Image (cartoon, rainbow, N blue to C red):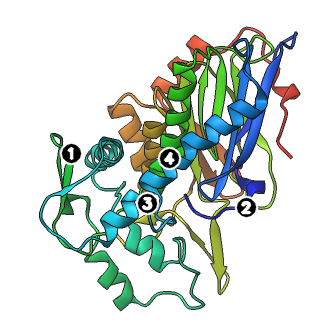
């Protein structure tokens, strides 16, 4: 949920459509969470207007920001991070649900995904504060690492509460925030009787039903190239969520070396992998958002193994020198076999400007 330009908001997944005949639809977009959202409703319910939809969607996203943003000092999460107590701290059911999902993914990934990694994210200049001119020293990295560790958090479901092992443990839900926002908007649309929609918050998408042309929503995975945008492959998505995480957009270069925003909790430093991007398909956007990040930290060998062992539909783009190689998990291949329409029109992809 950091401050990324709107131009790169959909850098990981490009929204596309295929089919023969277009039906009436509503499309809205705008800034949110320091990035960008887009919502498309195919065959909207009678009486739904563009202005009303935009107000409702942005109201939902504003509530999400008020719950989990580290950029908003008055958010519930910011207040939790500022609280030095080490006894039980009551939290809302909404915040509890997101933190609990992060802890579940942390356990499954053996800590590669860690919602307490915030001090390291901030130290390397990818958090709310301005990026420092100099790289952090080993001493600074080690001091930040002492505050990091998903096991430093304890959750209680009823009533919802959290306990920190140290008062200065800092929780960062950015790796779940886009997906959580998409899920919340989708839930609101469901409640309003919207049967066919596509909700995107940056590189995480939740889709239901068919697009305005009567086909599954077609999502293009980009090639992980920092200097240009090119479609690697098209994935049909209906009644599913999809998220891509990569190292090719949010990074900085210092003394000729590139530093990714993906931080490895085990080393305290940005990842150094041949894995360019990881795409995950599943039922909930919050979940696929988190696993896409976890896979990037795990890298090109451990990530596919975890996807296989847990039956996760994942697609990885690995750099082999100057070449790119796609690696699909068995669950991803099975998903494509079930969901790919007989007529595919990848050459009609519409890329956002």
Question: Callout 2: few (<14), some (14-19), or many (20+) C-alpha neighbours within 10 Å?
Answer: few
Q: CA distance from mark 1 to mark 2?
A: 35 Å
Picture coordinates of residue 17, whole percent (x, y): 79, 24
Question: Callout 1: few (<14), some (14-19), or many (20+) C-alpha neighbours within 10 Å?
Answer: some
**Residue labelled with disc 4:** 63
Indicate the secondary structure of the residue bearing disc 1: loop
- Whichever of callouts 2 and 4 sits on the residue coming sooner in the sequence is 2
Q: CA distance from mark 1 to mark 4?
A: 19 Å
Picture coordinates of residue 85, whole percent (x, y): 18, 70
Residue closest to the eye, 96 or 137: 96
Q: Which callout, 1 or 2, points to the residue nearer the camera?
A: 1
Quadrant holding the N terminus: bottom right
Indicate the secondary structure of the residue bearing disc 3: loop
Residue 206 visible? The answer is yes
* Callout 1–callout 3 Cβ contact below 8 Å: no
**Residue labelled with disc 2:** 5
Indicate the secondary structure of the residue bearing disc 2: loop
């Amino acid at each position: 949920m950091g401050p990324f330009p709107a131009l790169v908001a959909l850098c990981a997944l490009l929204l596309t459509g295929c089919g023969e005949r277009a039906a009436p639809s509503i499309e809205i977009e705008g800034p949110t969470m320091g990035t960008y959202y887009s919502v498309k409703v195919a065959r909207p319910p009678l009486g739904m207007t563009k202005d009303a939809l935009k107000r409702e969607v942005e109201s939902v996203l504003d509530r999400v920001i008020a719950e989990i943003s580290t950029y908003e000092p008055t958010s519930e999460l910011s207040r939790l991070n500022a609280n030095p107590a080490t006894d039980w701290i009551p939290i809302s059911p909404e915040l509890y649900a997101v933190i609990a999902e992060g802890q579940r993914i942390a356990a499954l990934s053996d800590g590669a995904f860690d919602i307490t990694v915030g001090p390291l994210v901030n130290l390397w200049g990818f958090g709310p504060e301005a990026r420092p001119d100099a790289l952090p020293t080993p001493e600074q990295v080690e001091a930040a690492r002492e505050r990091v560790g998903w096991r430093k958090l304890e959750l209680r479901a009823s009533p919802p509460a959290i306990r920190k092992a140290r008062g200065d443990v800092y929780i960062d839900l950015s790796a779940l925030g886009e997906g959580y926002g998409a899920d919340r908007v989708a839930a609101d649309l469901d409640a309003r009787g919207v049967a066919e929609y596509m909700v995107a918050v940056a590189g995480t998408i939740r889709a239901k039903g068919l697009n305005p042309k009567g086909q599954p929503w077609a999502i293009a995975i980009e090639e992980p190239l920092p200097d240009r945008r090119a479609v690697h492959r098209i994935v049909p998505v209906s009644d599913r969520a999809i998220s891509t995480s990569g190292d090719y957009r949010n990074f900085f270069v210092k003394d000729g070396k590139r530093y990714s925003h993906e931080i490895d909790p085990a080393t305290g430093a940005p990842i150094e992998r041949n894995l360019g991007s990881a795409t995950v398909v599943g039922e909930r956007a919050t979940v696929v958002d988190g696993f896409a990040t976890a896979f990037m930290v795990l890298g090109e060998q451990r990530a596919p193994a975890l996807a296989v062992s847990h039956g996760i539909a994942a697609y990885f783009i690995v750099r082999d020198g100057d070449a790119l190689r796609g690696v699909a998990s068995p669950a991803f291949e099975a998903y494509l076999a079930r969901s790919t329409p007989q007529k595919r029109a990848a050459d009609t992809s519409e890329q956002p400007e």
